[in-house]
Amino acid sequence: MSGLVAIFQRGRDKIEPARLETALTSLDHRGPDGDDMWINDAVGMGYQHLQSVPAAQTDDQPQRLDELVVSADVRLDNRAELCQRLDPPGDDESVSDSYLLLAAYREWGQQCVDHLVGAYAFVIWDAHENRLFCARDHFGVKPLYYHATDGLFAVASEPKAILTHPSIQPSLNERKVGDFLTNLFEDEENTFYESIRRLPPAHAMIVSAGNSRRWRYWDLDPSRAVTLDSNEDYARRFRDLFEQAVHCRLRTDEPAATTLSGGLDSSSVTAVAHEQLWPDEPLKTYSGVFEDAPESDEREYIETLVDRSGINSQYVFADDLSALSGFDQAMDYYDAPVHNTMHFMKWEIARRASDDEVGVVLEGTHGDSVVGYGLVLLPHLIRTGRWIQLVKELRAMGDVFDRQPRSLFLRQVLPGLIPDPVERLYRWIRRKPSVEMRANPTLDQGFANRIDLASRHHRLTDPRSAIARTAREWQYESVTAGSLVDFLEANDITHAVFGIEPRYPFLDKRLVEFSLAIPPTQQLTDGWTRMILRRALDDLLPEEIQWRSWKTTMNAAFIGALAIADDQLLELVEDPSMVEPYLNPESLRETHDRFQAERDIHSARVLWRALSLSAWLENTAGTQ
């Protein structure tokens, strides 16, 4: 999780070194291990270095090779394959990822991204072609933002670096404000600044003096199928890929840790990481726990795993933390308001890990979507006439989840049987009252009309809301959801503040492609969802975790943290000036009154978004 910045004066004006240095300095928090710049007339690059891969595989950036220069935040996971095909000089174990990037570009040009596996955001200057080439990894683990006009192209790991350029105005993007207030994530390009865009995941871009082109270079294929001989073969293949994903993400000289909730995903990451490190190295785990909110506390599961030799478990007792804990410091770094209601716990865990000199943290993020639940198998059984198997699965699910089979049929089967025209009519009717007003009843109607928020919701969510007809189509929508990109970008900056790189084994491209291609019967079997993961790690997971049928809700913990911030909520209600252009003050007051009386989760989330937006806008106004 290093940092990069590049400026291309497309009008051929020379780069002013001080201007590039100012942009690079704004990313100092991403480079505790040094920085450097490279300038050649109209092009300049800067790099902030975080030592997250082995020192022997690190070099100074911007890296140069022939007429190519690169600045990259990169971790390549298929190094052995690339070294075999590119034959770099010297020892394969000591060649750097940035050198391999340049060698790949020299060999394959813009198609180099077709040969990369890992997490990366990079920009390459090709002096022979007089153009920049930029790319972002398959799922958007590494952030990349850009500004493009006829005379200027600027790209960086964070918007703040781009905004240091005097010709780029920090005008607020009100459409993004509307998205934030109504929980809309599907726009993967816009940012909170009108002048800055995100390069979406799995996209590349070429920029020359007179032209630019952006394209998607990779996508999951929901029609692809993998067929193996037995359940054991599927589980063995999944295990191999998952162990490979964890191993690649443990490539570091820095102390590694995991965040551990006690759920199936983070426990799987922790169990495999421990197996790979022990007995050579211990593994630290960090878990948020709650004495006063037992429904959000998972210690009974966590302790079944961390009692193993070689696991050093660290608890963060979060009952006394306000929902705004860390905001005074965080707002100086964030280029967007905080959406995650559990940010206070994320921040505290990152701070504790930094105090312990942890350099890399592995998380179980997106495991639900990648492994899949297989629930779309149920309507598929009806469409293919397998009624006996359907009844068997519904009864088994009823036993596992303590639900009536009839209720499961109505919720999980019937919606998948509705004909497309009927389903489209139903969704059209549901738009009144508007989706956005249901998501946030404090929304100012004039603001919603001004940015045409209703049409925006309809346009961005309709394709993803359509009832998927196959398990793979449903899982594709889940894996590629826009909320993942928002989470990854927010999690990146939170950890950057503390000099830590977050890594995500479940987002390994090879694992995701395999998981999407397996039959839904590998996900749903005998009433148990996510069965392939339970089978694959049978010998590593404690039974209490392996056969958990439910997930712990963090609602009680969040409501308690927000209640601690009630003084700030009252200040917001009494003086809503920062958010008044977007929210109705009277509705905001009514929502606050309801929260004080009922402590309901919907009011809590609405108030949180108002509080977070107000804090960010106030800080942004003070720094411009």
Image (cartoon, helix red, strand yellow):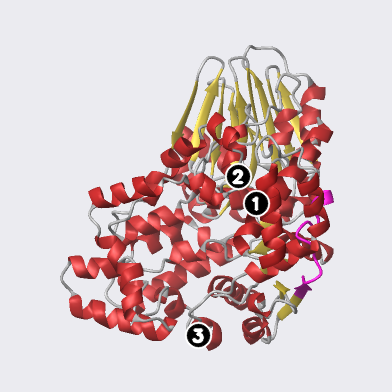
- According to the picture, the residue beneath numbered tag 1 turns out to be 339
Mark 3 vs mark 1: in front: 1
Characterize the magenta stretch by its predominant secondary structure.
Answer: loop
Q: Secondary structure at mark 3?
A: loop
Location of residue 545 by image quarter? bottom right
Q: Which residues are magenta?
A: 315-329
Q: Secondary structure at mark 2?
A: helix
In this rendering, the answer to whether 502 lies above or below 159 is below
In this rendering, the answer to whether 581 lies above or below 292 is above
Q: Nearer the viewer, residue 16 or 153?
A: 153
Determine the residue positioned at 66% across, 71% down.
Answer: 556
Query: How far is the residue under mark 3 from the one under mark 2?
Result: 43 Å
Dot 2, how many residues are within 10 Å of its Cα: few (below 14), some (14-19), or many (20+)? Answer: some
Mark 3 vs mark 2: in front: 2
In this rendering, the answer to whether 351 lies above or below 452 is below
Amino acid residing under circle 2 = Phe
